[in-house]
Amino acid sequence: MKIIRQKKDLVNLIKEINSLSFVPTMGGLHKGHELLIKKSLKKNKFTLVSIFVNPKQFNSKNDYKTYPKNFSKDIKILKRLKVKYLFQPNYKDIFSFKPKNKIYLHSFSRQLCGKYRPGHFRGVLNVVNRLLELIKPKHIFLGKKDFQQLILIKKHIEKKNIKTSIVACNTVRENNFLPYSTRNNNLNKKNKTLACKIFKILKNEKNTIKRKKLKKINLSIVRRKILNLGIKKIDYIEAINLKNLKKAKRFNENFNIFSAFYIDKVRLIDNF
C-alpha cells in the first residue's frame, strides 16, 4: 500500500491513474468502513482511502480532541483489505488552496443534525468539496447511517455538476444491533447495551406505524420511553420522508425514523 502524505504526490498519482474510486474517512476504521472499502475495491481495484480528521466539522474543541484515533490499527485493516492507496494529508494540504466550486448547502442542512450542530455540514462539505477537487474520483462511497450527510454531498455534487457518482452503502451493525461507529469506542459495555435498546425501540416504532397503518405519526410517546431509560439529552427523534426530505405524516410514506441522543457525553445517531 502506498501512503500519500503530500498534495503534490497525490496530484502525480492522479495523472498516472485514469480512474479512481474514493472512500473518505476520519480514521478509527470499523466494519462499516470495511464494507465501503470492499464495495469500492469490487468496482475498481484502484481505490484510494483518505484519513483526515476534519476540525471544521466539530462543534467543540473537546469533541475534536477526544475523537477516537488508532492509525496503526487503521493501517493493518487497509493492508488486510489490499487497499492500494492511502491519502493522509495535513491541514495545510487540504485548506491552503481556493477550490473552484463554492459549497452548495441544500436547505435539508437546517433539519436534524443541522439544527443542533451549527456549521457542521458546511465543515463537512468544505472538506469533501476539496477532496473531490484534488482526487477527481469516478465514484465516492458513503454510508447510509450518515444519511443527512450523504444527501447533502449528493445535492452539492449535482448542483456543481461534479463528475463523481455516489455509491450509498447500507449500515453495518454489531451483533447487538448497534451500528458501527468510530464514536462507539468511547462507550463502555453498559452504555453500548443501552444504545442498542434505544435503537431497537425506534425500529420497532417504525414497524408499528407501518403495521397499524397509522394516519398520523406521533413520536412523543417513544421519546418519553427513551427518556425513562435514563437518557438525559435527545436532540431529535423525527420521521423524515426519504423522497421530499420533509417530516413524514402518514404510514404509507417512504420514511425513516432519525434520532440523535447522548449517552454520557457521546452523541449517537441512526436511522431506520
Image (cartoon, grey):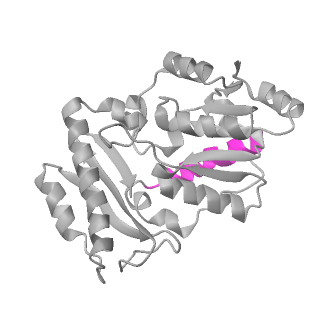
Q: Residue 187, relative to residue 141: is it above or below?
A: above
Q: Which image quadrant for residue 246?
A: bottom left
203 on left or right of 43: left
Q: Quadrant of the N terminus?
A: top right
Query: Who is closer to the viewer here, 200 or 118?
Result: 200
Q: Could you tell me what secondary structure mostly forms the magenta stretch?
A: helix
60 in magenta: no
Which of the pair 131/163 is nearer the observer? 163
Please state if 262 lies on the left or on the right of 113 as rendered.
left
Up/down of 185 relative to 211, above or below: above
**129 part of magenta stretch:** yes
User: Between residues 136 and 205, which one lies in front from this camera angle?
Assistant: 205
Position of residue 231 relative to residue 257, above or below, is above
Residue at image x 11%, y 55%? 228
Give the tally of numbered discs: 0
User: Where does residue 248 sit, x and y in percent of width and height?
Assistant: 39, 75
Residue 133, how many percent across, how many down? 75, 45
Is residue 81 visible in the rendered image? The answer is: yes
The residue located at (78%, 51%) in the rendering is 100
Query: Residue at horizontal 80%, vertical 27%?
Result: 8
The magenta stretch is 118-134
Q: Name the image quarter holding the C terminus.
A: bottom left
Specify the farthest residue to the bottom: 215
Q: Is residue 119 visible?
A: no
Residue at image coords 56%, 60% = 151
182, above or below 233, in the image: above
